[in-house]
Image (cartoon, rainbow, N blue to C red):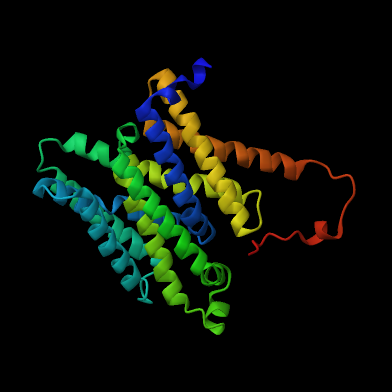
């Protein structure tokens, strides 16, 4: 079929594989981000890497290393300020976000290619993915899957009942640090391929859409992966046939899927039921393991 013609091209195939890998990583990590209400943190982390990326580019170093160092500073700062009782966590994240982003813009402004560098940072170039990038994403996916599996009980308890996590000896502070590390891994491993906008979009939109329908965390992760992959396929096809920016189109597709999912969920809730059930009087809204 002519509509699927783009996937016969090698660089589009690599872009699709990269999108699938990013979607799987973001499904694992983004589910916890959405359930814990860490969307602002994810946004701050993704844009807080700009100083490291900009400095690495100006010095001729690896943008990936610069991003990792900058994200590490951001994560340590959030963790340190988050323990200060007089400053709320959101305030700490906001201050670090603005500080890191402004520092990055100042550094990048010294480069003649300011606009190009900033555009590449935000949107990436998914159509320019190389085989080495795919290997890096595959490694990141393996690490994210391993950490998610080993820390599942601790993450679950931390998300829904931190006090119970402490009582059960699940070390909530360690779990919080590992979860922050997972967010950092997802963003750093993916941004140089698809840009921070696409990473953040796939980190939030698919899990949020899946959470409208699923109660169990593994089901949300599975649904988020399916929606993320769908957004990549649709985005690449639309980008090819209509000449739009690939990364931005994929993000738009992911957000559109969330909107459609939210509308469908609202219609289902409003639909009349044939027979009332005991659960209708106290519908459960909590998520389950």
Report the quarter where the C terminus lies: bottom right
Q: Which residue occupies 49% across, 69% down? A: 150
Q: Position of residue 24 (x, y in %)?
A: 48, 48
Q: In this rendering, would 125 be left or right of 176?
A: left
> Which residue is farthest right?
275
The residue at 36%/52% (across/down) is: 187
> 240 above or below 172?
above
Q: Residue 16 lies in what quarter of the image?
A: top left
State which quadrant residue 269 falls in: top right
* Percent coordinates x, y for residue 277 in the rendering: 86, 56
Could one spot residue 195 in this view of the protein?
no
Q: Is residue 80 visible?
A: yes
Horizontal relation, residue 61 to residue 266: left or right = left
Point out residue 146 in the picture as x, y percentages from the top left corner.
Answer: 46, 62
The residue drawn where x is 42% and y is 38% is 17
Q: Which of these two is toward me, 5 or 33?
A: 5
Eyeballing the image, is 9 above or below 51? Answer: above
Residue placed most toward the observer, 46 or 181: 181
């Amino acid at each position: 079929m002519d509509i699927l013609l783009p996937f016969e091209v090698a660089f589009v195939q690599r872009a699709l594989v990269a999108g699938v890998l990013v979607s799987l990583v973001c499904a694992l990590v983004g589910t916890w981000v959405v359930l814990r209400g860490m969307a602002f943190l994810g946004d701050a982390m993704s844009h807080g890497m700009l100083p490291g990326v900009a400095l690495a580019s100006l010095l001729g170093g690896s943008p990936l290393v610069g991003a990792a160092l900058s994200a590490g500073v951001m994560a340590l700062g959030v963790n340190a300020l988050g323990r200060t009782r007089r400053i709320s966590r959101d305030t700490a994240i906001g201050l670090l976000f603005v500080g890191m982003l402004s520092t990055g813009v100042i550094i990048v402004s010294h480069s003649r290619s300011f606009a190009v560098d900033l555009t590449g940072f935000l949107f990436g170039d998914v159509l320019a993915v190389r085989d080495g990038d795919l290997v890096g994403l595959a490694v990141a996916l393996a690490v994210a899957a391993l950490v998610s599996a080993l820390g599942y009980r601790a993450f679950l308890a931390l998300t829904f009942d931190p006090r119970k996590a402490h009582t059960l000896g699940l070390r909530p502070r360690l779990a919080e640090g590992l979860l922050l590390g997972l967010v950092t891994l997802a963003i750093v491993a993916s941004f140089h391929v698809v840009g921070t906008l696409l990473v953040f979009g796939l980190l939030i939109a698919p899990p949020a859409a899946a959470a409208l329908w699923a109660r169990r965390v593994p089901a949300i992760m599975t649904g988020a992966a399916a929606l993320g992959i769908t957004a990549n396929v649709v985005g690449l096809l639309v980008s090819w046939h209509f000449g739009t920016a690939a990364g931005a189109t994929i993000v738009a597709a992911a957000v559109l899927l969330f909107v459609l999912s939210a509308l469908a969920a609202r219609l289902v809730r409003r639909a009349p039921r044939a027979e009332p059930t005991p659960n209708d009087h106290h519908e459960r809204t909590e998520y389950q393991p």
